[in-house]
Image (cartoon, grey):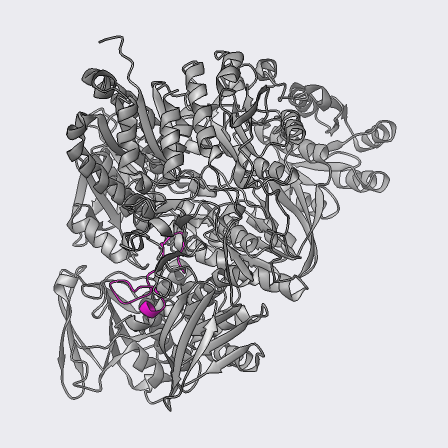
Amino acid sequence: MKRKIGTALVAGAGISGIRAALDLAECGYGVTLIDRCPHIGGILSQLDYQFPTDRCGMCKMLPSIARDDSSQYCLRKGLFHENIEIRLSTEIISLEGEPGHFKVMLRGKPGLISHELCTGCGACTAVCPVEVPDEFNEGLSLRKAVYLPVPHAIPNTYVIDTDACTRCGACEEACPTAAIRLSQGERRQFHILVVDDELIVRDSLKEWLEDEGFSVDMAESGPEALEQLANCAYHLMLADIKMTGMDGVELLKKAKEALPDLCVVMMTAYATVETAVEAMKIGALDYLIKPFDPNALISMVLRIYQDFETGQGHLSDFGAVVLCGGAAYFNPAESKNPFGYGVLPNVITSLEFERILSGTGPCQGKLVRPSDGKAIRKAAWIQCVGSRDLQTDADFCSDVCCMYAIKECLLAREKAEGEIETTIFYMDMRTFGKSFQRYRDQAENEQGVRFERGRIHSVIQDKEDNEGNLILHYSDRGGALHDESYDMVILAVGQLPAAGMAELAEMLKIPLNPWGFAQSEPFSLTQTGREGILLGGSFSGLKDIGESVTQASAAALSASRVIHAAGGSQEIESDTSEYRDVSRDYPKILVLVCTCGNRLSASDPQEIVRELEKDPAVFHVEFLGQTCTAEGWDRLAGLAEKYKPNRILIAACLSYIYARKLRELARQIGLNPALTEAVSYHQSASNPRGSGNLLSLLRMGIARLRHADPSPVLSVPVCQEALVVGGGIAGMTAALAVADHGFQVYLIEQAEVLGGNLRWLQKTIEGYEIKTLLDDTRMKVEKHPRIQVHIRTRVIASYGQVGSFFTTVQDEEGLTHTLEHGVTVLATGGTEAAATSYGYGTSSLVVTQKELEQKLAEKSLDPKKLAAVVMIQCVGSREEPRNYCSRVCCASALKHALYLKSQNPDMAIYVLYRDMMSYGFAETYFTQARKAGVIFIQYEVKEKPRVKISDQSVYVTVFDPILGSELEIESDLLVLATGIVPALPEYIVTTFGASVDRDGFFQEAESKWRPVDSLKEGVFGCGIAHSPRSAAESVISAEAAAQRALRILSYKQLPGGKFTAKVRHSLCSLCERCIAACPYGARVIDTDSEKIQVNPVMCQGCGSCAAVCPNSASFLEGYSIRQMLEVVDAAFA
Amino acid sequence: MTDFEPTIIAFVCNWCTYTAADLAGTSRLSYPQNVRLIRVMCTGMVDPQYVIKAFLEGADGVLVSGCHPGDCHYINGNFKARRRIKLLKEILPQFGFEPERLRLTWIGASDGIRFAEIMRELSAQIRSLGPGGAKLNMVI
């Protein structure tokens, strides 16, 4: 793939960063993906299991089109894409310029281990004498100071923890490739001047710093310091603020006048912190508070030293910046800590529990307590630790904890084979996402997870047995006190802003919300307020994977828009490089074996060469040392140049790292990259590798390569136009997003005007006017030269596949015409569900939330005349058949309650709810409503409120669990929250080849990893046709859908992958079993030619079709029967 | 019998089990060397004839291992494999092989430890079954 003009920076390589980077890269932009950690994957590198499957599935995020441009292996292992440059241990230092033309300074942390030389052998770890808590296992296990940050990741370069390392030099000696340079000597060159009038301070500082290897001088007063500065070149000055004579601030001023580049750190007593802050304004780099912690001092000096070593970093140009920095997690030990975290060994955080469950964790995936190895048979989860807690300044909900607690319960039950009691102590179970409620119900009713509503007072050590068990002291809903003993207590910790958030926001000039998370613009969850800088994932508050991924795609869209507007081209030039035509040549395989230093010594090279060269397809066999190093690779490339083979086989310890290099090498020598292969012999390091094993491995590789087909990758033509069905906010947003990239869009709306639900909505809970959004969007759509709006029109039928759909639409007069388009976005929306209970329809005193909103807007209802209002939540929702949460109802109830209270503070408002779903930062409105005197009464679905209606009043009877008795409330108005139902006719979905879920919403390909795609390539869903959501959430889902569509529209010819299924028509009996077997609908029967056709883009290369074919007519390229049978043969070498 | 070193052919899926095998390797876990891994894109593409071919060529045991149910990169390939292996076990005796010589497992990408465990377990199991019938009874 050739790149188009324009590059983007994605900061943060967690799940949202990967999504944003892949989305932009798949559209052809160059992307630099950075992360301050030494690995990609963010928090997901620590999490093995995700609901609803309770497994992984991250690899499903990899490109489904032009698959050969990216890695095709487990995404948790690593990622490469032709258009993505990944830079780890790298941070943004500064940003200047305009949207479309940002100049960003990036600085990488210098590694003490060379990436080029490290082979990942682990000899260094074996000799390292230092042991510190392993952050990968959340401190539950120990690691050495030289370590692998993530055991499964590649490249598996070791890193040195510079804070923990004692510089003993053992690893440097042990390293067989001289990859480690501790550069102790270089620290001597770093001169530090310590200025303090107290001798003891000067002496101890000198001692500490000299232990670290720095050169240290001392001065006891300001004038003396200035004199020394004039005589010797210092890199860093540590200056005390309070000194007799010339004080520290004056010294700083004078020193800076003479030496503007000098780094100065102020030392201050606690009382003069303000002075130190002032000092920073006039040029001091930082300050330290006395008495200092030597570790804090050393790590600060080391940081300054590293900055000095790396210099000022690299300046790069980027069109847009997507911030995907994720979030941090609350540390219960740093607060009031009633649960004894950090004190009681068996009280752990949810993240620590994930590590216990993990196969790479401290307990090897066994469900035991890390403290004493005892099996966990009774565990309690405590929700909302660091969330929904005003005492820890956390007036927000962290969104994800309820669901992961349920998941962890289910995983624990699976691991313990049901022999475990699991209890979740919660305030509200916030199961507000698609399918979440059913997941919870299943956990409760089928799996036996106990849900206990209540707040835990405290956790104490169980005194009666000495096995480390814990007593949970709590009161239930009725006020009765309980003490229960548990093996383990898991705290569902809430969110905190990512580390360094405030500094980053200040540098980038982007606003933060009151809790320190990035603040987005009204109706947009991705815009920061500074154009060209976008928010993805949890940077603006914790999100689950599905939402992070959606938001990342939406951020990618906004970034792409900025780059496009600044002159980035939108069309991908297809790969024009010509490969040598080797289709008629005999196979001429060059076999290269990396000896991996001398670790391959067990095998006899000469014997292997002799054996292999018996095969006429093998042209030359060579053993090379360390092909993973730059030097080794050059030798290898030289051989490829010299022998001009038409197939190359490499055997090395880690075949993964060769995937990208091999492609480059193949191009270099004009060979189709599909004719190269890397095989891995790193399958067991404990046993010596017998030559027989290596020989069979090589023979298996040769067997596959011999029959590799050199024909080019197939592609399908793309009609670069889009069809958007539905003209609500989602449809309009998607249409604009696509059209802004220069592609024609047909927008189909069955009503007379565009706008959908926005036409009756008034304000959001935050107080933003919906009308502004509607008018603005509608005007842009109607004026857009590339959008053709068809109102009063409906879709009749469609046929076709990705790149070329033909859709027939019919207007009100019955006239039909056919539109050709390459992609389809379904945004048909939804409506408020009909109310059928609680006396609705029998009295004007019973209304729905929507009707209330309308009545308040048209002022047909005077709040001043209402003495009491009752709102009932979850009317007909969150129970079968509509067993899902509609997300918006709790927020609208809070919005209306707060409005009514503001208009008439004397009004009594009762909200009868099951679980308040004020997720995220909407929690603060729940707090506000309670402060305003709104009364919330929780009811159970088994004990619903009862309603009696008279002429003047509605009498609602409900059981109040706190009072423990029934209440009868007389009110003037009863408001029912009925939730959302989709308006997505099934025939429309199926005509495009997609499907609906059991509730009638759009069925996504994968709820977590591909949330807006359908399984059929080229069809996308967004807005409330996809799932219930607010206006702003509809906007991001529409932007995400548009971004996914743009990946396809960017091509004139859309390439598939090398390994796709094909059909030998002469053998095919048209039994159509392959059509049924294909999970992607990539196969159709062409009735005219009577042939099975495979769409090379939709085919993902699973080979299911080949396995079901009774005649072996269907086969998977690269894995044909001939190849596979030869591979099996070769395995016995 | 104690000297018998069984040959085991393992068809492993590219996404999960192959990754787990790799993790077992990089984590330096020990497992028997007599397992030959054949990487396939998905267990759903393992044609019964590959398995039978492996047995006929002299394999003492065959393992097919992919992603956990619900986790398949290709949506449902592992379910297809499950059905197919069940049927294959039914007909294996007709070829003269005990059905216990064929095994289907799910090993996720992060289950390096589980991979090594299963390999040891399988190796022990096959060792107790003795050499496969092909080498002894058939002329190939």
Using residue A424 as the reference point, say whether residue A801 is left or right of it. Answer: right
Compared to residue A755, the image places residue A332 above or below, namely above
Q: Position of residue A6 (x, y in %)?
A: 65, 57
| Along the viewing direction, whichever of B27 and A522 lies nearer the viewer | B27
Q: Which residues are magenta?
A: A989-1012
Using residue A455 as the reference point, say whether residue A308 is left or right of it. Answer: right
| Along the viewing direction, whichever of A459 and A429 lies nearer the viewer | A429
Q: Quadrant of the C terminus of chain A?
A: top left
Q: Position of residue A710 (x, y in %)?
A: 53, 42
| Along the viewing direction, whichever of A861 and A989 lies nearer the viewer | A989
Q: Which residue is drawn at the image coordinates 49% and 56% (left, top)?
A: A552
**Main SS of residues in magenta:** loop
Using residue B42 as the reference point, say whether residue A643 is left or right of it. Answer: right
Q: Which residue is drawn at the image coordinates 21% and 28% (left, top)?
A: A463
Q: Position of residue A111 (x, y in %)?
A: 62, 30
Magenta includes A934? no
Q: Position of residue A390 (x, y in %)?
A: 39, 54
- Which residue occupies the extreme bottom position in the image? A813
Compared to residue A1027, the image places residue A470 above or below, namely above
Q: Is residue A896 visible?
A: yes
| Along the viewing direction, whichever of A1117 and A797 lies nearer the viewer | A1117
Q: Is residue A274 visible?
A: no
Q: Quadrant of residue A1041?
A: bottom left
Magenta includes A1005? yes
